[in-house]
């Protein structure tokens, strides 16, 4: 099988599923190394395929599915992270990413694609395992989330809930 044929099959598989597909699974399915899959994903992205890398695998993001997005500037403790994420998904939001503006490195961003309570649980389990700490810790708890939802009204509900919990940083006019 050629690389192009494999990439076409990877793309088809990503289009047909709504759950992340792990690179390990793709490597096994196509009898190649994990590194080959990483290279295939990079080639597909270069061809303007909107492929997200999550902690559970790859997903194809349809622009039509994203609805509207808003960036929220946040500040909360490690202990509040779970509640922050659960608040966003409870009101119908998807936490697309987390990023910080580091004074030396500039913008450091990770894709999250947290869209359900189960996703929150898995993310928090990974953080609590001790393998790593939240990205926000490198900027004294200040961080940003790009949140997508089906409507501006949903984003307004999320914003209000985050304000009430004092997680949202409100810019002074």
Image (cartoon, rainbow, N blue to C red):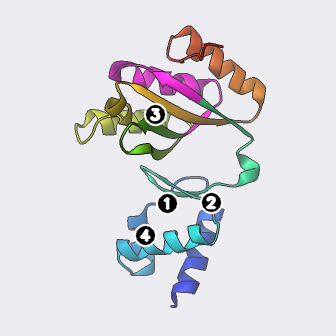
Left or right: 40 with respect to 139?
right
Question: Which labelled disc corresponds to residue 21?
Answer: 1
Position of residue 81 measured from the top left corner of the image (x, y, whole percent): 41, 24
Residue denoted by label 3: 120
Q: Nearer the viewer, residue 57 or 169?
A: 169
Residue, disc 2 = 50
Q: Residues within 10 Å of mark 2 (few under 14, many from 20)?
A: some
> In whole angstroms, how far apart are the C-alphas of marks 3 and 4?
25 Å
- Magenta-highlighted residues: 72-96
Q: Disc 4 on helix, strand or loop?
A: helix
Say which of marks 3 and 4 sits in front: 4
Percent x, y of residue 76: 41, 19
Residue 38, numbered circle: 4
Separation of residues labelled 3 and 2 (CA atoms): 23 Å
Question: Is 83 covered by the magenta stretch?
Answer: yes
Q: Nearer the viewer, residue 88 or 106?
A: 106
Residue in the picture at 53% in, 34% down: 145
Badge number at residue 43:
none
Whether 69 is drawn above or below 158: the answer is below
């Amino acid at each position: 099988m050629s690389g192009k044929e494999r990439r076409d099959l990877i793309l088809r598989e990503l289009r047909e599923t709504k759950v992340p597909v792990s690179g390990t699974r793709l490597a096994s399915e196509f009898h190649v190394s994990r590194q080959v899959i990483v290279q295939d994903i990079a080639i597909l992205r270069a061809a303007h395929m909107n492929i997200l890398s999550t902690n559970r695998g790859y997903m194809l993001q349809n622009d039509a599915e994203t609805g509207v997005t808003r960036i929220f500037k946040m500040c909360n403790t490690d202990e509040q992270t779970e509640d922050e994420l659960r608040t966003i998904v409870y009101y119908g939001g998807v936490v697309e990413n987390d990023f910080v503006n580091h004074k030396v490195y500039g913008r450091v961003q990770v894709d999250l694609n947290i869209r359900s309570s189960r996703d929150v649980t898995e993310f928090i389990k990974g953080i609590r395992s001790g393998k790593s700490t939240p990205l926000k810790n490198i900027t004294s708890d200040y961080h940003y989330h790009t949140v997508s939802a089906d409507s501006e009204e949903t984003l307004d509900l999320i914003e209000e809930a985050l304000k009430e919990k004092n997680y949202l940083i409100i810019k002074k006019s």
